Amino acid sequence: MNLSAAATPVAIVFSDAAPAAGTVTLTFDANAVTYGTDFSTLPAADGNTVVVPFEAGATTVHFTFNKLIDAIEGQVKNVAFTVTAVSFGGTISANDSIQLNFNETASLGSALAAETGGPTQPNQVYIDLSSGTMTMAKRVSWDLGFYSGTDFRVVLNSSLKMAAKKLETTNIDEVQAADETMIIAQGQGIASQVDNPTGVFDNDASTHDTAIDAISANDADNKVYLVNMGSNPAANAPAIGADGSGSGSLRGWMKIRVLRNGNDYKIQYADIASITHQEVTISKDTAYNFTFFSLTTKNVVPVEPQKTQWDLNFTTFTNLLGGTTPYYFPDFVVTNLKGGAKAYMVSITDTVTYDSFTKANVVQDNFTDNQTNIGSNWRSTSVNGPNGPVSQFVLKTDRFFVIKDPAGNIYKLKFTGGANTAGERGYPTFQYALLQ
């Protein structure tokens, strides 16, 4: 993580709620910095050890890193923390360390390749332009995202073509039946059963923000939902130029009901044929846009970086054509709107080019509240053949994009490719530069 703030919360996520109160112990290695002079922590360190307490039932615990002196040009200053112990004997699994870098300024730009995983695109890739870092998560690793803001909202994993239908009952233990009309195909599905692709939560009763209604403080208002779990990526690579990201096996059906629990969420869930259910509390974590939960593994799982630490998400996506028709898109780019990032497209003309575009050319009013402003606008996926359209990745070279990150840095970005030399899709590349 590149430090842009004086105080940065760092989260440690548990796969399940803690069975008892306890502590997490971390040790750190400092590079060109001194504790108490260049940095400090809360809780305070003892030597090179930080002990962070948590309460019973916690699913996340934080410590705060305080940057006391910035790096100057040419300096490399960082501190690497590693989780070394949990008091009640929990298992320390992957992603057990983090390096915090003292950055003086945002990156001036770079050329990157988002590792979405090839033609079946199994990965979601989060890009932080100011540091040039990428964070990857398996698309099938999560199903529901629980919003950490003021609202109580639950989103579906649109990268898997999920859908949710509100039922008339509040009894999660009633047996339900699959509803084949909920399956999302190209031009098939019901708009109200998928999340609004803009990503805006405006709480306007006349608009559709999420497939699952805002969670009410009145339990009686929170109905059971039938959930189509969508589709896996294809098990085998598709034909050259074709998409294999959403043509795998169907993931089945679940039923869920979400309630409030103070400032947390409580989710009840079960297979549709079950007459009993399971229940778990999901805590809001304001360092992140969402807390993610897997109905398959029954765990809270790490997916997105902290909300100010990413700008773009390379993913697959369930969009709405004309605002009314669900349509699944591979090779899609989502902007971190909820974290404060925005984007807009610039068409290349005789007088406006990527190379000539400067900060003076930026039009602030073009940064609209829509996380899909890049979306699929950077590519097309077919060409005209002798017998009609043929699947083939096509890069659109007549445009580029302007991105404002959560810290206010503004970048220009152009895509340079989306297929490998064999013509297989799922290999996006781009370059970008900081506008100063």
Image (cartoon, rainbow, N blue to C red):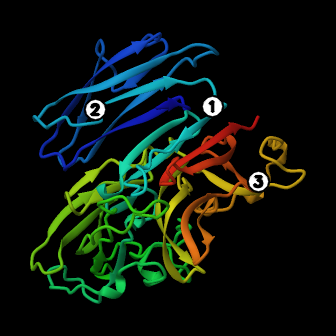
Identity, as a three-letter code, of the amino acid under mark 1 = Ala
Direction from residue 211 to residue 257 in the image, left or right: left
Q: Residues within 10 Å of mark 1 (few under 14, many from 20)?
A: some
Q: CA distance from mark 1 to mark 3?
A: 20 Å
Q: Which residue is mark 2?
A: 96
Q: Quadrant of residue 100?
A: top left
Read off the residue under disc 3.
364
Which residue in the structure is indicated by mark 1? 106
Q: Residue at x 19, y 57 (%)?
A: 297
Question: For residue 268, which quarter of the picture?
Answer: bottom left
Q: Secondary structure at mark 1?
A: loop
Q: Quadrant of the C terminus?
A: top right
**Residue 176 seen by the camera:** yes
Is the residue marked by circle 2 packed among few (<14), some (14-19), or many (20+) residues within 10 Å?
few
Is 250 located above or below residue 139 in the figure? below
Q: CA distance from mark 3 to mark 2?
A: 40 Å
Q: CA distance from mark 2 to mark 1?
A: 26 Å
> As rendered, which of 129 and 331 lies closer to the eye?
331
The first of marks 2 and 1 along the sequence is 2
Q: Is residue 153 visible?
A: no
